[in-house]
Amino acid sequence: MDTKVKQSQGKLKWVGTRQVRPDGVDKVTGRARFGADYSLPGMLVGKVLRSPHAHARIISIDKSKAEALDGVKAVVSGEDFPDIAKEEAFIGEGPINFRYMAHNMMARDKALYDGHAVAAVAATSEEIAQKALALIDVQYEVLPHVIDVRDAMKPDAPILHDDLFTEGVTPEPTRASNIAKQVEFGRGDPDAGFAKADVIVERDYSTQPVHQAYIEPHATLASVDEEGKCQVWASSQGHFMVRAYCAKLLGLDLANIKVTPTEIGGGFGGKTLVYIEPVALLLSRRCSRPVKIVMDREEVFRSTGPAPGSHSTVKIGATKDGKIVAGYAEMRLQAGAYPGSQIGPAGMTAFAPYEIEDVKAVGIDVVVNRPKVAAYRAPGAPLAEFPVESAIDELADKLGMDPIEFRLKNAVKEGTQSCYGPVFQKIGFIETLEAVKNHDHYQTKLGPNQGRGVASGFWFNIGGESTATVNVNEDGSVVLIVGSPDIGGSRASLALMCAETLGIDYKQVRPLIGDTDAIGYTFLTGGSRVTFATGLAAIEAAKNCIDDLRKRAAILWDIDVSNVEWRDGVAHPVDAYSDEHEPMTLKQLAAQSAKTGGPITGHIALNAEGAGPGFGSHVCDVEVDPETGRVEILRYTAVQDAGRAIHPSYVEGQIQGGVAQGIGWALNEEYIYNAEGRLDNPGFLDYRVPVCSDLPMIDTVIVEVENPNHPYGVRGVGEVPIVPPLAAVANAIEAATGKRLADLPMSPPKVLAAIDE
Amino acid sequence: MNYQSPETVDDAVAALSAAGAAGRVLAGGTDLLVQMRSGRRSPEHIVDVKNIPEMRSVTMTADGFRIGAAVAGAELGEQAQVIAEWPGVVEAFELIGSTQIQGRATLGGNLCNGSPAADSVPAMIAAGTIAVIAGPGGRREVPVEEIMTAPGQTSLGDGELVVEFMLPRRAPLSGDAYLRFIPRTEMDIAVVGAGVNLTVDSAGVCQSARVGLGAVAPTPLLVADAAAALVGSTLDDDALNKAAAAASAACNPINDKRGTVEYRVKVAGVLTRRAAKIAYDRARAHA
Ligand SMILES: Cc1cc2nc3c(=O)[nH]c(=O)nc-3n(C[C@H](O)[C@H](O)[C@H](O)COP(=O)(O)OP(=O)(O)OC[C@H]3O[C@@H](n4cnc5c(N)ncnc54)[C@H](O)[C@@H]3O)c2cc1C
């Protein structure tokens, strides 16, 4: 770290304050431009034809009638896209196989789920495009389908992929199956561990696939000119990701593609992939006109990735004095139509909050005739930690221990080796448990039919590649350019850190997100990385800018740069020269920059390491209607270690949003497939995310145990809060009714059936 | 597509008659426009009834109320006297949708859309509401329970529309209530709906009752057995349990994405019991 930058430690001026977000006014006035808001002259409407079958061989696709329709400019199907070989990459928050991604974007020989794209058109109007879809003649041979993960694992199940042989098992299988892969994590000998246990709980659990339910459907505008230069506007979590995937899936030169990020109306992991961008590009290339594709909600539900569903068996053993001695989990995850559910993160997170000597977690990836899964906030963790946090509650009950005390007795802390391998650095799990214990919520009395549950949650958080540029304008204001799409208020947080580092007013910093040609490579917005990693880049770019500013002052004062110090936004000559020169502000230096070498900037490109793991502990009160099984959330308090809250309002917003989504996952969200394997509830009327009046104000408590690997101590915060609610609600229902529900969602009919048992 | 916006009932009837099977009434449009967008209905002639004053007004006489079939939920919600006398009907109507939907949704639309789960209908049935129907042959009066014939279908003939609904003035010692069950708190379709209207004597003994149920059969039901179980009682547990059992027995639901047969049957009884208690308390308070 540069010793010439004096940070008034502890006395931060901007970090930790609640400033108005730079993008706020545009968003509340409707001026902000989201994916569907972009248009170009001569633009065409693109639409996608989707399979009505859950599983079918595509015998033929006749596009001739559609092509002949007046106003239709291009029609494409699988055969028009390059054939992509199987190639594994670990990008973002899950494994990617480009062949699967290509086939998921546009079906080739088989349609694998209701909603699978089979063809697309570009036409001069929405009506014509719609008519053209109806004129595409697809001949299908309908095949038997399988929707449930347990059915898909049976030996006589319909097979989705003839060339899928289970990886990670011995002996290597000789028959294709729907089981793509098996992974294992852990240490020690669980059998020996269970032998030491005085109390053991074991149970089967299941969770349903749930959609990220971002408010903005996928939308893109693509334009290819006669020279093959491609431009894409897309609502995504990463425009560099869109560029890379479009190049890969279309066999294009990456250098020929420019992607401009639009404002994004939510992603939650679901926009870390491409579905329509390469399709729009190909359509545009065919007719040299811009093509816009906007999904409707039904398409979003039928064809984009939810989080996987799961069916798990979890067993935990503890001694009489409350020490967990063994843990075992087998989790069968529903990948959707192509392999690639988050079995890795599920296996690693399941037992992560606890110190257990003998522990094993097995993850199994299973394909079924549903849309391929995508990342969703802490991908894999909620479904893995829900059974464990439920079992912990059950164990505490059996041992007669308070569930917080039981967790405290087994909680990981600095220096503990995690169940998945690494040794934890400084973490704040214990602090979150203490905060719950000391919160008045934990002490209040409950009435009849009411119950209280607690649960904790863990997520790794990641760092990764980020680029940032700080440009000083001639009036002394500053533009901060980054490559991270802002989906949670990151422009505000980055501007705060930039202003703090430079020592200038927050309002003097204008943050913006550069397109793929305007800023260096930046990994997508995911893994709760932006405030940490791009934040680090913003700080480092600001520091480089400060070095430039010091140089300019040195030139003006004609002294060596080592004799210039930067303090609170002002260049000071060091003591020996302090009588000779007046300190100069950033504004003064900017005004004279032409004399000292031209515009002043700072730039950095880095790969951030040392993301601090995040922990949260939640407490939830419910009331259960014993005659209808309806669960009302009475009160909810979420405690989380944020490392340091750069903008506390947005940390609170992340926590509240995660809790709301977790409660939906716990109580009502599920996909309903009919006997033909068609989705019966592709809309918000019957896919029940919580509405505003379903939830109480969610109280948040931010604990700050600083991440030593970040100048301001930042940890990621966006993902942890969706992890604990599933078990917190289940544990509360158990407390209210005496019934343990292990099968999500805990919808009224299921709760009533349990009560009436 | 042809759109007409007549200002009298006669003109509306004429327009509908001329259009025949291709015609469709548009009131608030909160069902119809959604169905048109999704491609489920594509009428060629639309007759908008929101500009017909007779259908947009609420009048009160010594005999009763006349509520225009095109009065929006938010408008009825401002009618203090209707709320005071028919709280069950008003609360059922106001449960529909959200603030935005309330600005558009009408009783006529809720009934004529033909959904078995329409919220206002069981409450109107329990209240003994009469629908006034206008058509090429003049006007006729029909009890609300006789309008829906099957999901999406009504007993209205060609060129007919519902003009208004008639409710009597509230008799002393009587009251009504409506409850619905949904998994969420709003923006959902009833899994079960139950409306109860009853009259007691000064000793609190139930003299007469009507029970309406929604979402438990192909059409909303008038359940005479459940009402009979209440009459002659002070709504003690025994009478309430009998009424609940009768309500459950009257159900003929389907398994669908909103609920199972078993669940709907059970909850129909629970809601009937709960709605009856509220109606009873209101009746006793309305001396
Ligand atoms: C977001 C949302 C939430 C909703 N929530 C609920 C709810 O909670 N409960 C519920 O019951 N419904 C709900 N609905 C459905 C709808 O709002 C109601 O059924 C509403 O009462 C319909 O009234 P409308 O005036 O909008 O009907 P319209 O859509 O105008 O008409 C509906 C049908 O009735 C016919 N029609 C209308 N008026 C007459 C008339 N006077 N004579 C003859 N035929 C007529 C029309 O031709 C059409 O077929 C919801 C709808 C939406 C969009």
Image: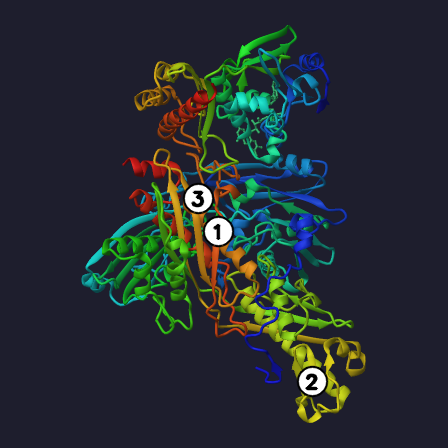
Q: Quadrant of residue A351?
A: bottom left
Is B117 placed above or below A710 here? above
Q: Position of residue A328 (x, y in %)?
A: 28, 58
Q: Chain of mark 1?
A: A
Inspect this view and state whether residue A721 appears: yes
In this rendering, position of residue A570 left or right of residue A178:
right
Q: Position of residue A121 (x, y in %)?
A: 64, 42
Question: Which quadrant of the render holds ligand 1?
Answer: top right
Q: SS at mark 2?
A: strand
Is B142 placed above or below A174 here? above
- Circle 3 is placed at which residue position? A369
Mark 2–mark 3 CB contact (< 8 Å): no
Disc sitting over residue A698 in the figure = 1
Q: Residue at x 61, y 68 (%)?
A: A14
Q: Chain of mark 3?
A: A
The lab-note entry on whether marks 1 and 2 share a chain reads yes
| Image colouring | rainbow
Looking at the image, tell me whether mark 2 or mark 3 is earlier in sequence order. Answer: 3
